[in-house]
Structures are given as C-alpha cells and as structure tokens.
C-alpha cells in the first residue's frame, strides 16, 4: 500500500466523518466498509491489502488503548461483574453453543464449526456506541457494550488459537489444559498492562513537555502489547489494562487535566485516522472473498449468532445485573462483528493446512461479518428509538 493510497483513504475517511459530525445519522465504520467494497472495483486500489499482522500489531493496540484510556473507570466498576462475565464465561459458552448449531447446518467437522464460532464471537461496537448514546441517552448500556468488547478480544484469541490447533490436528483438547492456558494468558497480560501503566504514570512526572508525555503514551500502548506477546501472554489485555491504569491514575488528580487534554487531542486524531484506513481496507479486502454461493450459509449462521447472543446476554443479565427487556435486547443487538473477526479470518487463511476446509470457512465468515456490520449497525438507531419510546 503506497503513501498516495493512504492519503486518499484518509481523505475519504475525513469526508465521511465530516458529513456525520454527531455520529448519530449513520454508523461511519460501516459506511466506510461499503465504500471500500466499491473501491475494490477500481484498478488503482488493486495493490491495497491488509494482513493479519498489520491489523494485529498496528491497528488493534492503538484502538484498544484509546478505548481503554477513554473508558470511564467509575462506570467499569459499576458494571464490572456483568462486563467481565460476558467477556469470559459468556464468550466461552457462546462459542460452544454457536459452534454446535453451526455444526448441524454446515459441511464441517465439530472442531471446525467451533473455529467458525470463535471467529464470530468477538464484538466490535465502534460503529454503534455513539449511536446508542444518542438514541437512548443512556451511557450505561453503551459502557456495558464497549467494556465487554475491550475484554472479550483477549478471550476470543485464546479460544480461537486452541480450537484452531485442534481442528488442524496440532494438539489435543483437555479442559484442564485449556483452563490453565486461559488463566495464564489472561492474568499475565493484565498484570503486565497494570504494572507498565502504573510505572509510566509515575515516570511521566519527570518530563514537563507534553510532546514527550504523549510519546510515552505511544510507547506504553505498543510496548505493553509487544512485551506481553513476546512472553506469550495476552497483548490485547495488556494494552487494555495499561490504558485503564493510566486513565485511573490521572483521574485521581485535577492537576493532571492538562495531560489528559493533550492525550485526548493526540489519540482522537489517531483513532479516526486508523478507523478510516482500517475499515476502508477491510471493505477492499473482503470483496475478494464474498460469493453468492456462500450467502445462504452466512445468513443462516448470522441468525444463529444473533439468537445465541440474545440467549447468553439474557442469562447473564438475569443472574448478575437485571435489566428491562429493551436494554437487554440492545446489548445483544450491539454485539456486531468487525476488525478482530477479520484478523482471525486472515490468520486462519494464512495458517490453515490442507486438511482444514479453509476456503469455505473464510468465505462464509467474511460474508457473515459483512452481514452483521451492515444489518446490525444500520438498524441500531431506529430499533433503539422504537423500543425505548
């Protein structure tokens, strides 16, 4: 991808974001994906492509750090039980329920069906969080959706890695080994993020230049991710924990407001720039794999995905944090798919063996992600307004 292409993609993103300044008329990331699909038919963009490494090591750490840093700590505390349960036990149950139902309708073995479910489990509500806030005037629902998304990425990667290895016959599965690996990867990532976030929040006092303080935040976002990945624990959770820790530390003292303003200004620009490029490139990339031949399978799996999501959210909220049915449905419907699912699809595509039906899985999951993005994000505003009347 050339610098000229990047500038053009940024310009397109700028135009789209500017049209919808309040983020409540249409979900900008979804519109960008649709535009990206159109760009795929222009020869100039034939050389534009995205790999799993680019998504995972460049886009995801920054976007997760931004979400974690900007996430209200007091709101996380208030809804921590529900958020953590949905992002851990809820995700695991979701994968096995959706995988079992997928196995019944798809030409796949059980392990491969579970891999499909693991790909379609992480949520990416960046398209709808601001719309939910505008439509419902209820920040708590948006915070639950966003908080779950930040944490469930790490769970999904562990599940996907384990199930993918089983489907490729590279390892056997035991509940004990999976639980041990899951705890090690998760707790290790969180610990690294919390420690580095705390250290950076103290080190930053040695510099009185805002530019250098912002540089430290960049080092923290990517450094926590890379260190965690290097020792084989969750880089995703490390980045999330570091962002939340630095937010917590600077939220305790009003004298740090100048730093937060500088940080907000820098990372807000990074966020919209990365979102513009990422979703446009996803649209360009996804076009290669979409086929009407797989559409019925994809739509059927989408229906099953929504059904399982509603069931999991209902059971979890019933036990931990009772909500009225409109809010329960909104949390369920806002669990659309996006960049993390695309990363997992591309990982599967590049690493699967001949014994794995990768062509079918890649085509169907890409199509399912597109259906989810378009249908759920475009309908979230009218549904919110209608059921909350």
Image: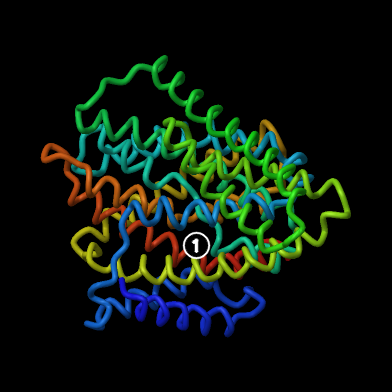
Percent across and percent down for residue 250 are 78, 49
Residue at 63 percent of width and 43 percent of height: 242
Q: Is residue 22 above or below residue 386?
A: below
Residue 2: image quadrant is bottom left
Give the residue at mark 1: 376
Q: Residue furthest left?
A: 354
Is the C terminus in the top left, top right, bottom left or bottom right quadrant?
bottom right
Q: Is residue 375 above or below residue 338?
A: below
Residue at 45 percent of width and 55 percent of height: 337
Q: Which of 120 and 9 is in front in this view?
A: 9
**In this rendering, would 101 be left or right of 331?**
left
Percent across and percent down for residue 118 are 38, 40
Is the N terminus in the top left, top right, bottom left or bottom right quadrant?
bottom left
Residue at 23 percent of width and 62 percent of height: 289
Q: Is residue 271 above or below residue 306?
A: below
Count residues near mark 1 (Cα–Cα under 10 Å), then give few for <14, some for 14-19, many for 20+. many
Residue 348: image quadrant is top left
What element does badge 1 sit on?
A: helix
Q: In this view, does 194 lie above or below 203?
A: above
Percent across and percent down for residue 380 are 57, 65
Q: Which residue lies furthest to the right in this view?
A: 254
Percent across and percent down for residue 292 are 22, 65
Q: Nearer the viewer, residue 39 or 198?
A: 198
**In this rendering, would 318 be left or right of 299?**
right
């Amino acid at each position: 991808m050339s610098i000229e292409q990047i500038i053009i993609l940024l310009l397109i993103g700028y135009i789209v974001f500017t049209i919808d300044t309040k983020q409540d008329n249409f979900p900008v990331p979804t519109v960008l994906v649709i535009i990206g699909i159109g760009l795929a038919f222009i020869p100039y963009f034939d050389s534009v492509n995205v790999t799993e490494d680019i998504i995972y090591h460049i886009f995801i750490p920054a976007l997760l750090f931004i979400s974690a840093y900007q996430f209200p700590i007091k709101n996380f505390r208030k809804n921590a039980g529900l958020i953590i349960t949905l992002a851990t036990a809820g995700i695991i149950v979701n994968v096995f329920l959706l995988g079992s139902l997928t196995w019944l309708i798809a030409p796949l073995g059980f392990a491969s069906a579970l891999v499909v479910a693991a790909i379609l489990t992480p949520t990416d509500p960046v398209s709808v969080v601001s719309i939910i806030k505008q439509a419902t005037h209820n920040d708590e629902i948006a915070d639950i959706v966003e908080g779950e998304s930040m944490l469930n990425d790490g769970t999904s990667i562990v599940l996907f890695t384990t199930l993918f290895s089983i489907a490729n016959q590279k390892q056997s599965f035991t509940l004990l080994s999976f639980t041990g690996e899951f705890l090690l990867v998760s707790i290790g990532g969180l610990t690294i993020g919390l420690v580095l976030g705390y250290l950076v929040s103290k080190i930053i006092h040695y510099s009185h230049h805002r530019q250098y303080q912002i540089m430290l935040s960049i080092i923290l976002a990517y450094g926590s991710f890379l260190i965690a990945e290097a020792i084989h624990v969750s880089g995703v959770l490390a980045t999330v924990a570091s962002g939340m820790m630095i937010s917590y530390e600077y939220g305790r003292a009003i004298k740090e407001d100048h730093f937060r303003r500088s940080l907000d200004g820098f990372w807000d620009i990074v966020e919209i720039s990365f979102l513009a490029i990422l979703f446009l490139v996803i649209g360009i990339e996804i076009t290669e794999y979409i086929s009407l031949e797989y559409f019925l399978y994809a739509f059927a799996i989408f229906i099953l995905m929504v059904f399982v999501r509603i069931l999991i959210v209902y059971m979890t909220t019933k036990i931990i944090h009772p909500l009225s049915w409109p809010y329960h449905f909104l949390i369920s419907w806002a669990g659309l798919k996006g960049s993390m699912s695309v990363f997992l699809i591309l990982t599967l595509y590049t690493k699967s063996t001949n014994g794995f039906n990768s062509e079918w899985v890649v085509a169907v999951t890409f199509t399912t992600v597109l259906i989810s993005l378009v249908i759920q994000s475009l309908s979230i505003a009218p549904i919110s307004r209608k059921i909350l009347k």
